Image (cartoon, rainbow, N blue to C red):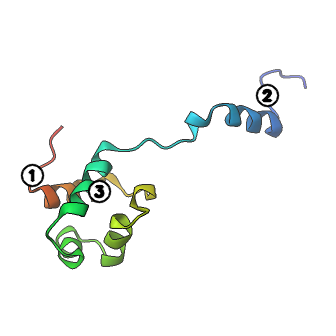
Amino acid sequence: MDNPEVLTRKQLSARNRKAPSLRTPKHSKLKTKVLELLQDTPFTLAEIAEACDVSVPWIARLKGPHGDTLNPSVDRMEELYEFLSGKELTL
């Protein structure tokens, strides 16, 4: 190749395999806390869904065994945190 900085697809693929941390999602502290709160809440899924303007199936998936693999928006997580904890999220 004329330009030594241009990588082929094969080279890019090999480079990505060598650096898995580039592809590994970080675990959000907020999401982790919300998942903990969901496990311990006295509220029903319907009550949470209505208060936070989300669907019951969405809350059920988040609370389920694979909830940590979902990637919900920060707005939803903030709303859930504030409802479930009874506290405003401050940074």
Residue at image mark 3:
35
Residue at image mark 2:
6
Q: Position of residue 47 (x, y in %)?
A: 17, 76
Mark 1: few/some/many CA within 10 Å (<14, 14-19, 20+): few
Q: Nearer the viewer, residue 69 or 51?
A: 69
Disc ID at residue 87: 1
Circles 3 and 1: CB atoms closer than 8 Å: no
Which mark lies nearer to you, 2 or 3?
Answer: 3
Which residue type carries mark 1?
Answer: Lys
Q: Is residue 26 above or below residue 35?
A: above
Q: Position of residue 67 (x, y in %)?
A: 39, 61
Q: Quadrant of the N terminus?
A: top right
Q: Is residue 47 above or below residue 36?
A: below
Q: Quadrant of the C terminus?
A: top left
Disc ID at residue 16: none
Q: Residue at x 9, y 51 (%)?
A: 87
Specify which label sits upstream in the sequence, 1 or 2. Answer: 2
Quadrant in the picture for residue 70: bottom left
Circles 2 and 3: CB atoms closer than 8 Å: no
Q: Residue at x 80, y 33 (%)?
A: 11
Q: Position of residue 46 (x, y in %)?
A: 22, 79
Question: What separation in Å lies between label 1 and label 2 (alpha carbons)?
Answer: 51 Å
Which residue type carries mark 3?
Answer: Leu
Q: How many marks?
A: 3
Element carrying mark 2: loop
Outermost residue on the left side: it is: 86
Which residue type carries mark 2?
Answer: Val
Element carrying mark 1: loop
Element carrying mark 3: helix
Mark 2: few/some/many CA within 10 Å (<14, 14-19, 20+): few
Question: What separation in Å lies between label 2 and label 3 (alpha carbons)?
Answer: 43 Å
